[in-house]
């Protein structure tokens, strides 16, 4: 079931206590979610994430603009039809569990059936069984852990077999173990072909989705595709550009070698659409390339003489530079970790592990590794390690010059 949001704004009036002006929670948002897609919505507090989910979930109406769900403009539906549409098409999972405290887990699930004008105890039990809670069916919410309560909410959301799942910070109140259980259920729902729209503040959780959008001040500030094979290739391209620039070379499309399903030129076109890189024409200029080694890709760019080796030159955008710096930092810190702390001697094993770590470390774990290693300035091969916030707090200021832009961090 697809979702099309067209120029949607949501404005709340100022309160009666003298709050000046109105609050524009969403400001001209346009967004499409394909059937079966998993979309993550990110952004700081007050950016409009929950307002957007409430509109998609038919819990509120936009001030202006239209929302089409499976071709139906839900903005124009009367209240009774809107409620019916939501009950039949949409399952809601919130950070706050919203379970009725004096009803059992089974009764809370059956309550959703009641609003759908039908009840079936066996079906409700089967829903609880699917989330591993059949033996807890008769327990009150107070006798369930936070993770168990959230799984009751998932069972309740699924009881009417909705095509769309809306999850607003579904793991925000959970510990790591219960977070993984809940995310496993969401991954299974995604495999079943359901459309999922999930609000999260956690970039690691967001990477489970196919795509993310980031809201700032009620508008879409950026979006990122999380088809993992493509995303990994994008990181590899960014590394390649960084390595070439670091060695004083231009990043010519025709000279770049990166593994992946997409040809490098197509990958770069997509990255340009995402605002990570920008291309400019490379005229037929007589020039000499240096011998450049990219250790992660195990690629040696030999010294060559060329008049027009590539039709385009690729440069970072500010967003692309930051993402490349983060990838390079994770990779080179991992090299340091395996060499300095874990005493691994095999160069191939070090590079293999570093290439894995560069894609999976969260910012928090990266900073912890950096602090543990004493904020090293270079990798074991002498290449500089971009600084992070932890380095600045520790008094290390790094200066990097990439893509013609000198940046203090």
Image (cartoon, rainbow, N blue to C red):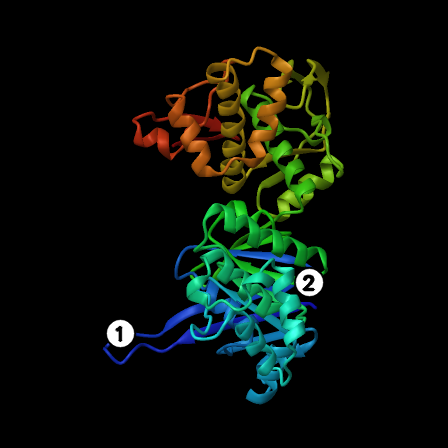
Residue 293 position (above or below residue 24): above
Residue 117 position (above or below residue 219): below
Q: Which mark is residue 141?
A: none
The answer to which of 162 and 277 lies nearer the viewer is 162
Left-right relation of 394 to 99: left
Looking at the rendering, in which quadrant would you find the C terminus? top left
Left-right relation of 278 to 141: right
Please identify the quarter of the rendering in which residue 265 is found: top right
Q: From the image, tell me which residue sits under label 1.
A: 19
Helix, strand or loop status at disc 1? loop
Looking at the image, the residue that sits furthest to the left is 17
Residue at image location 63% in from the left, 76% down from the top: 121
Cα–Cα gap, marks 2 and 1: 41 Å
Pointer 2 or 1: first along the chain = 1
Q: Residues within 10 Å of mark 1 (few under 14, many from 20)?
A: few
Q: Position of residue 124 (x, y in %)?
A: 63, 72
Residue 136 position (above or below residue 289): below
Q: Nearer the viewer, mark 2 or mark 1?
A: 2
Residue 160 in view, yes or no:
no
Q: Residues within 10 Å of mark 2 (few under 14, many from 20)?
A: many
Residue 49 in view, yes or no:
yes
Residue at image location 57% in from the left, 10% down from the top: 345
Residue at image location 49% in from the left, 67% down from the top: 139
Please identify the quarter of the rendering in which residue 398 is found: top left
Looking at the rendering, in which quadrant would you find the N terminus? bottom right
Residue at image location 63% in from the left, 62% down from the top: 129
Q: From the image, tell me which residue sits under label 2.
A: 194
Q: Position of residue 61 (x, y in %)?
A: 51, 79
The answer to which of 373 and 238 lies nearer the viewer is 373
Q: Position of residue 267 (x, y in %)?
A: 70, 40
């Amino acid at each position: 079931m697809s979702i099309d949001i067209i120029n949607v704004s949501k404005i709340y009036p100022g309160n009666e206590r003298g709050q000046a002006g109105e609050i524009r929670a969403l400001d001209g948002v346009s967004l499409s979610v394909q059937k079966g897609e998993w979309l993550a919505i990110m952004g700081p507090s007050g950016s409009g994430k929950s307002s957007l989910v409430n509109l998609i979930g038919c819990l509120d109406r936009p001030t202006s603009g239209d929302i089409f769900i499976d071709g139906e403009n839900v903005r124009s539906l009367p209240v009774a039809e809107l409620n019916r549409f939501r009950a039949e098409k949409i399952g809601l999972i919130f950070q706050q569990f919203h379970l009725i405290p004096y009803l059992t887990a089974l009764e809370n699930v059956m309550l959703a059936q009641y609003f759908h004008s039908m009840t079936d105890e066996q079906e409700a039990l089967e829903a609880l069984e699917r989330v591993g809670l059949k033996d807890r069916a008769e327990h009150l919410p107070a006798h369930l852990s936070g993770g168990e309560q959230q799984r009751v909410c998932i069972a309740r959301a699924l009881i009417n077999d909705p095509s769309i799942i809306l999850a607003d910070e579904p793991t925000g109140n959970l510990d790591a173990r219960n977070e993984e259980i809940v995310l496993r259920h969401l991954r299974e729902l995604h495999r079943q072909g359901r459309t999922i729209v999930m609000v999260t503040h956690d970039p690691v959780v967001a990477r489970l989705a196919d795509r993310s959008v980031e809201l700032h001040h009620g508008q879409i500030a950026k979006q990122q595709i999380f088809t993992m094979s493509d995303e990994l290739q994008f990181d590899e391209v960014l590394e390649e550009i960084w390595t070439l620039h670091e060695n004083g070379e231009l990043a010519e499309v025709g000279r770049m070698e990166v593994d992946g399903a997409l040809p490098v030129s197509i990958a770069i076109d997509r990255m340009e659409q995402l605002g990570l890189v920008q291309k400019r024409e490379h005229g037929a200029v007589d020039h000499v390339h240096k011998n450049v080694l990219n250790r992660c890709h195990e690629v040696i760019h030999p010294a060559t003489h060329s008049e027009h080796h590539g039709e385009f030159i690729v440069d970072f955008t500010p967003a692309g530079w930051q993402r490349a710096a983060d990838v390079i930092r994770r990779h080179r810190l991992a090299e340091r970790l395996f060499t300095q702390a874990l005493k691994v001697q095999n160069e191939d094993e070090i590079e293999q592990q570093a290439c894995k770590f560069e894609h999976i470390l969260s910012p928090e774990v990266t900073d912890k590794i950096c602090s543990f290693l004493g904020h090293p300035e270079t990798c074991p091969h002498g290449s500089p390690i971009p600084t992070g916030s932890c380095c600045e707090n520790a008094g290390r200021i790094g200066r990097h010059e990439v893509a013609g832009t000198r940046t203090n961090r």
